[in-house]
Image (tube, helix red, strand yellow):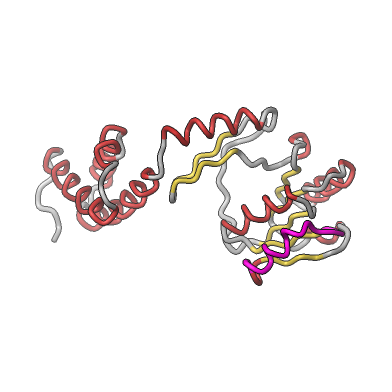
Amino acid sequence: MGYIPLFLNVEDAACLVVGGGKTALRKAQMLLDAGARVVIISPQFDSAFADLQSRCGRALTLRQETYSTSDLSAFQLVFAATNQHALNRTIAEDARRNGIWVNVVDEPDLCSAICGAVLQRGPVQMAVSTGGICPTLAVALRDELAVQYPDTTGTFAAAMGNLRDWLREHCPEMEMRKRVLHRLASRENRDRCRGWEPAALLPKLQHDAEQLLREFGKTGLRD
Protein backbone atom coordinates (compact mmCIF):
# COMPACT_ATOMS: atom_id res chain seq x y z
CA MET A 1 0.00 0.00 0.00
CA GLY A 2 1.61 3.25 -1.16
CA TYR A 3 -0.63 5.70 0.70
CA ILE A 4 0.29 8.00 3.56
CA PRO A 5 -2.28 9.76 5.76
CA LEU A 6 -2.44 13.38 4.65
CA PHE A 7 -4.88 16.25 5.15
CA LEU A 8 -5.03 18.72 2.26
CA ASN A 9 -5.93 22.38 2.63
CA VAL A 10 -8.31 22.97 -0.29
CA GLU A 11 -9.64 26.35 0.81
CA ASP A 12 -9.95 28.46 -2.35
CA ALA A 13 -8.32 25.66 -4.38
CA ALA A 14 -9.67 24.90 -7.85
CA CYS A 15 -11.07 21.35 -7.83
CA LEU A 16 -12.78 19.35 -10.58
CA VAL A 17 -15.47 16.72 -10.23
CA VAL A 18 -16.41 14.73 -13.34
CA GLY A 19 -19.85 13.15 -13.05
CA GLY A 20 -23.44 14.19 -12.57
CA GLY A 21 -24.88 11.58 -10.19
CA LYS A 22 -25.28 11.18 -6.44
CA THR A 23 -21.64 10.20 -5.90
CA ALA A 24 -20.37 13.29 -7.72
CA LEU A 25 -22.80 15.35 -5.65
CA ARG A 26 -21.32 14.02 -2.40
CA LYS A 27 -17.76 14.71 -3.53
CA ALA A 28 -18.68 18.23 -4.59
CA GLN A 29 -20.40 18.91 -1.27
CA MET A 30 -17.34 17.68 0.63
CA LEU A 31 -15.08 20.04 -1.32
CA LEU A 32 -17.43 22.99 -0.97
CA ASP A 33 -17.73 22.44 2.78
CA ALA A 34 -13.94 22.74 2.95
CA GLY A 35 -13.97 26.05 1.06
CA ALA A 36 -12.84 24.84 -2.37
CA ARG A 37 -13.86 26.35 -5.69
CA VAL A 38 -15.52 23.48 -7.54
CA VAL A 39 -16.22 22.86 -11.22
CA ILE A 40 -18.41 19.88 -12.12
CA ILE A 41 -18.51 18.50 -15.64
CA SER A 42 -21.17 16.11 -16.93
CA PRO A 43 -23.47 15.81 -19.95
CA GLN A 44 -26.37 15.50 -17.48
CA PHE A 45 -26.88 16.37 -13.82
CA ASP A 46 -29.04 14.91 -11.08
CA SER A 47 -31.79 17.34 -10.09
CA ALA A 48 -30.14 17.88 -6.68
CA PHE A 49 -27.31 19.82 -8.34
CA ALA A 50 -29.66 22.76 -8.97
CA ASP A 51 -30.23 23.12 -5.22
CA LEU A 52 -26.49 22.84 -4.56
CA GLN A 53 -25.84 25.55 -7.13
CA SER A 54 -28.39 27.90 -5.53
CA ARG A 55 -26.80 27.44 -2.09
CA CYS A 56 -23.17 27.77 -3.14
CA GLY A 57 -23.28 30.56 -5.68
CA ARG A 58 -20.00 31.37 -7.40
CA ALA A 59 -18.06 28.72 -5.47
CA LEU A 60 -19.67 26.11 -7.75
CA THR A 61 -19.70 25.98 -11.54
CA LEU A 62 -21.74 23.41 -13.47
CA ARG A 63 -20.59 22.69 -17.00
CA GLN A 64 -23.04 20.54 -18.93
CA GLU A 65 -20.64 18.99 -21.42
CA THR A 66 -18.49 15.93 -21.96
CA TYR A 67 -15.06 15.64 -20.36
CA SER A 68 -12.00 16.72 -22.32
CA THR A 69 -8.35 16.26 -21.40
CA SER A 70 -7.82 20.02 -21.65
CA ASP A 71 -10.25 20.45 -18.75
CA LEU A 72 -7.56 19.47 -16.24
CA SER A 73 -5.06 22.27 -16.72
CA ALA A 74 -6.58 24.66 -14.16
CA PHE A 75 -7.14 22.23 -11.29
CA GLN A 76 -5.22 21.04 -8.26
CA LEU A 77 -7.41 18.05 -7.36
CA VAL A 78 -9.71 15.90 -9.51
CA PHE A 79 -12.49 13.46 -8.66
CA ALA A 80 -13.59 11.01 -11.33
CA ALA A 81 -17.11 10.03 -10.30
CA THR A 82 -18.73 8.72 -13.45
CA ASN A 83 -20.26 5.28 -13.98
CA GLN A 84 -17.99 4.64 -16.98
CA HIS A 85 -14.81 2.71 -16.20
CA ALA A 86 -13.05 3.71 -19.43
CA LEU A 87 -13.75 7.40 -18.86
CA ASN A 88 -12.62 7.22 -15.23
CA ARG A 89 -9.39 5.58 -16.34
CA THR A 90 -8.81 8.29 -18.95
CA ILE A 91 -9.33 11.00 -16.33
CA ALA A 92 -6.90 9.25 -13.96
CA GLU A 93 -4.25 8.91 -16.66
CA ASP A 94 -4.67 12.55 -17.69
CA ALA A 95 -4.36 13.70 -14.09
CA ARG A 96 -1.21 11.67 -13.43
CA ARG A 97 0.36 12.92 -16.63
CA ASN A 98 -0.27 16.49 -15.50
CA GLY A 99 0.91 15.93 -11.93
CA ILE A 100 -2.58 16.44 -10.45
CA TRP A 101 -3.91 14.43 -7.50
CA VAL A 102 -6.85 12.28 -8.59
CA ASN A 103 -9.47 10.20 -6.82
CA VAL A 104 -11.43 7.65 -8.83
CA VAL A 105 -14.54 6.50 -6.99
CA ASP A 106 -14.57 2.75 -6.19
CA GLU A 107 -11.36 2.15 -8.17
CA PRO A 108 -8.43 2.48 -5.77
CA ASP A 109 -5.93 1.15 -8.31
CA LEU A 110 -6.51 4.29 -10.37
CA CYS A 111 -6.19 6.72 -7.45
CA SER A 112 -3.28 8.86 -6.40
CA ALA A 113 -5.45 10.16 -3.53
CA ILE A 114 -8.19 8.44 -1.57
CA CYS A 115 -10.80 9.71 0.87
CA GLY A 116 -11.19 7.99 4.21
CA ALA A 117 -14.34 7.68 6.26
CA VAL A 118 -14.29 10.99 8.16
CA LEU A 119 -15.49 11.87 11.64
CA GLN A 120 -15.78 15.62 12.20
CA ARG A 121 -15.87 17.09 15.68
CA GLY A 122 -15.45 20.85 15.34
CA PRO A 123 -11.82 21.44 14.31
CA VAL A 124 -11.01 17.76 14.92
CA GLN A 125 -11.04 15.45 11.92
CA MET A 126 -10.48 11.71 12.17
CA ALA A 127 -10.21 9.77 8.94
CA VAL A 128 -10.14 5.99 8.64
CA SER A 129 -8.85 4.32 5.49
CA THR A 130 -8.33 0.75 4.39
CA GLY A 131 -6.39 1.81 1.31
CA GLY A 132 -9.55 1.39 -0.73
CA ILE A 133 -9.81 -2.39 -0.27
CA CYS A 134 -12.85 -2.30 2.06
CA PRO A 135 -14.51 1.11 2.52
CA THR A 136 -17.35 -0.51 4.46
CA LEU A 137 -14.92 -1.51 7.21
CA ALA A 138 -13.55 2.05 7.30
CA VAL A 139 -17.10 3.36 7.81
CA ALA A 140 -17.75 0.84 10.60
CA LEU A 141 -14.55 1.87 12.38
CA ARG A 142 -15.44 5.54 11.91
CA ASP A 143 -18.84 4.91 13.52
CA GLU A 144 -17.14 3.26 16.49
CA LEU A 145 -14.95 6.34 16.90
CA ALA A 146 -18.09 8.50 16.84
CA VAL A 147 -19.28 6.79 20.01
CA GLN A 148 -15.92 7.20 21.70
CA TYR A 149 -15.51 10.87 20.76
CA PRO A 150 -18.75 12.87 21.25
CA ASP A 151 -19.53 16.37 19.98
CA THR A 152 -17.90 17.86 23.09
CA THR A 153 -14.54 16.77 21.64
CA GLY A 154 -14.76 19.64 19.17
CA THR A 155 -15.59 22.15 21.90
CA PHE A 156 -12.63 20.95 23.94
CA ALA A 157 -10.31 21.12 20.91
CA ALA A 158 -11.30 24.72 20.18
CA ALA A 159 -10.63 25.69 23.79
CA MET A 160 -7.26 23.94 23.70
CA GLY A 161 -6.34 25.90 20.58
CA ASN A 162 -7.10 29.15 22.39
CA LEU A 163 -5.17 27.92 25.42
CA ARG A 164 -2.15 27.22 23.20
CA ASP A 165 -2.22 30.84 22.01
CA TRP A 166 -2.56 32.05 25.61
CA LEU A 167 0.39 29.95 26.71
CA ARG A 168 2.59 31.42 23.97
CA GLU A 169 2.03 34.84 25.54
CA HIS A 170 2.48 33.73 29.15
CA CYS A 171 5.18 31.08 28.99
CA PRO A 172 8.24 31.60 26.76
CA GLU A 173 9.58 28.06 27.24
CA MET A 174 8.39 25.76 24.46
CA GLU A 175 9.09 22.52 26.30
CA MET A 176 7.14 23.74 29.33
CA ARG A 177 4.19 24.65 27.12
CA LYS A 178 4.27 21.23 25.49
CA ARG A 179 4.26 19.52 28.91
CA VAL A 180 1.26 21.55 30.04
CA LEU A 181 -0.71 20.93 26.84
CA HIS A 182 0.12 17.23 26.89
CA ARG A 183 -1.20 16.90 30.44
CA LEU A 184 -4.37 18.85 29.70
CA ALA A 185 -5.05 16.92 26.47
CA SER A 186 -5.19 13.61 28.37
CA ARG A 187 -8.31 11.45 28.32
CA GLU A 188 -8.66 11.93 32.07
CA ASN A 189 -8.78 15.71 31.73
CA ARG A 190 -11.07 15.60 28.69
CA ASP A 191 -13.55 13.54 30.69
CA ARG A 192 -13.40 16.03 33.57
CA CYS A 193 -14.14 18.88 31.18
CA ARG A 194 -16.98 17.17 29.32
CA GLY A 195 -19.79 18.90 31.22
CA TRP A 196 -18.36 22.41 31.09
CA GLU A 197 -20.06 25.14 29.06
CA PRO A 198 -17.92 26.45 26.17
CA ALA A 199 -17.70 29.97 27.66
CA ALA A 200 -16.33 28.61 30.95
CA LEU A 201 -14.00 26.02 29.49
CA LEU A 202 -11.10 28.28 28.47
CA PRO A 203 -10.89 30.04 31.86
CA LYS A 204 -10.88 26.63 33.52
CA LEU A 205 -8.07 25.40 31.27
CA GLN A 206 -6.09 28.58 31.89
CA HIS A 207 -6.45 28.06 35.63
CA ASP A 208 -5.32 24.45 35.31
CA ALA A 209 -2.40 25.51 33.11
CA GLU A 210 -1.22 28.01 35.72
CA GLN A 211 -1.31 25.30 38.36
CA LEU A 212 0.67 22.95 36.14
CA LEU A 213 3.26 25.60 35.37
CA ARG A 214 3.79 26.09 39.07
CA GLU A 215 3.86 22.32 39.57
CA PHE A 216 6.52 21.99 36.89
CA GLY A 217 8.59 24.65 38.59
CA LYS A 218 7.61 27.63 36.47
CA THR A 219 7.33 30.96 38.33
CA GLY A 220 6.61 34.55 37.38
CA LEU A 221 3.96 34.22 34.67
CA ARG A 222 3.85 37.22 32.38
CA ASP A 223 0.94 39.59 33.04
Query: Given the current orientation, which residue lies at the most extreme left position?
Result: 220
Most foreground residue, 27 or 13: 27
Q: Nearer the viewer, residue 127 or 8?
A: 127
Front residue (pair 29, 75): 29
Q: Position of residue 190 (x, y in %)?
A: 30, 38
> In the picture, residue 194 is in which quadrant?
top left
Q: Is 46 part of what is drawn in magenta?
A: yes
Q: Nearer the viewer, residue 187 or 71?
A: 187
Q: Is residue 169 left or right of residue 113?
A: left
Snapshot quadrant of residue 33: bottom right
**Residue drawn at 67 percent across, 28 percent down:** 134
Residue depicted at x 88% and y 59%: 66
Horizontal and vertical percent position of residue 143: 52, 33
Quarter of the image where the N terminus is located? top right
Is 143 displayed left or right of 98 in the figure?
A: left
Assign the magenta stretch its main secondary structure. Answer: helix
Q: Is residue 88 above or below residue 15?
A: above
**Dividing the picture into quarters, in which one does residue 132 lie?**
top right
Residue at screen point 71% across, 53% down: 25
Check if residue 213 falls in the magenta segment.
no
Span colored in magenta: 42-56
Q: Residue 159 location in percent, x, y? A: 31, 51
Residue occupying the point 44% across, 33% down: 147
Residue that extends furthest to the bottom in the rendered view of this protein? 58
**Position in image of residue 108 (x %, y %):** 74, 35
**In which quadrant of the rendered image does the C terminus lie?**
bottom left
